[in-house]
Image (tube, rainbow, N blue to C red):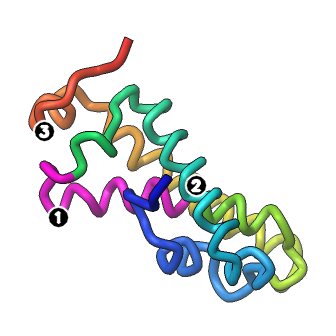
Amino acid sequence: MAETLCTSGMVKHRANYGASSTVTNSGTWMTELINQAEGQVIADTRVNWIDIYSTLNADFKQVLEQATACWAANAVIAYDTRGFLGVNEAATMINVNWAQYQQAIKTLKEDKTITFFGATLGA
């Protein structure tokens, strides 16, 4: 699968300076995490945003990028927290990403958002 909803650079940005280079420098690993994050966004919102991605405006794509990058960044951080200034810093990064993911998902799940872009809820 391709990285549609976000880039590896955005995941690195969200994971911050302490992120393991073992993960962030592996294109295959980053693609896998981004694909998993995209699947989670689709599952949580019950809309296949990848199928309608080309119809979305640039501003709305930012919401999808935020959700996807935050989810994938948390997977990167959780893999190895040794690059952070202690567990508290890693936990703070995860909490910030999680809060932003939840807010983005809330926006993406709103009926008016979904219908505005011509999508339909999955079964």
Pointer 1 local density, CA inside 10 Å: few below 14, some 14–19, many at least 20:
few
Q: Where is residue 107 shown, x and y percent of the image? A: 31, 42
Question: What is the number of the mark on residue 82?
Answer: none
The amino acid on which the numbered mark 2 sits, given as a three-letter code, is Trp
- Taking the spot 38% from the left edge, 38% from the top edge, the residue there is 106
| Residue topped by disc 1 | 58
The amino acid on which the numbered mark 1 sits, given as a three-letter code, is Ala
- Tell me which numbered mark, 1 or 3, is placed earlier along the sequence: 1
Front one among 5 and 114: 5
Pointer 2 local density, CA inside 10 Å: few below 14, some 14–19, many at least 20:
many
Looking at the image, residue 53 lies above or below residue 44: below
| Residue topped by disc 2 | 71
Pointer 3 local density, CA inside 10 Å: few below 14, some 14–19, many at least 20:
some
Q: Is residue 104 magenta?
A: no
Q: Where is residue 14 shown, x and y percent of the image? A: 55, 73
- Taking the spot 73% from the left edge, 80% from the top edge, the residue there is 19
Numbered disc total:
3
State the separation of the CA atoms marked 3 and 2: 23 Å
* In the image: residue 104, left or right of residue 53: right
Looking at the image, residue 110 lies above or below residue 77: above
Q: Which residues are magenta?
A: 54-70
- Tell me which numbered mark, 2 or 1, is placed earlier along the sequence: 1
Looking at the image, residue 75 lies above or below residue 22: above
| Residue topped by disc 3 | 117
Secondary structure that dominates the magenta span? helix
Q: Where is residue 1 shown, x and y percent of the image? A: 50, 52
State the separation of the CA atoms marked 2 and 1: 20 Å
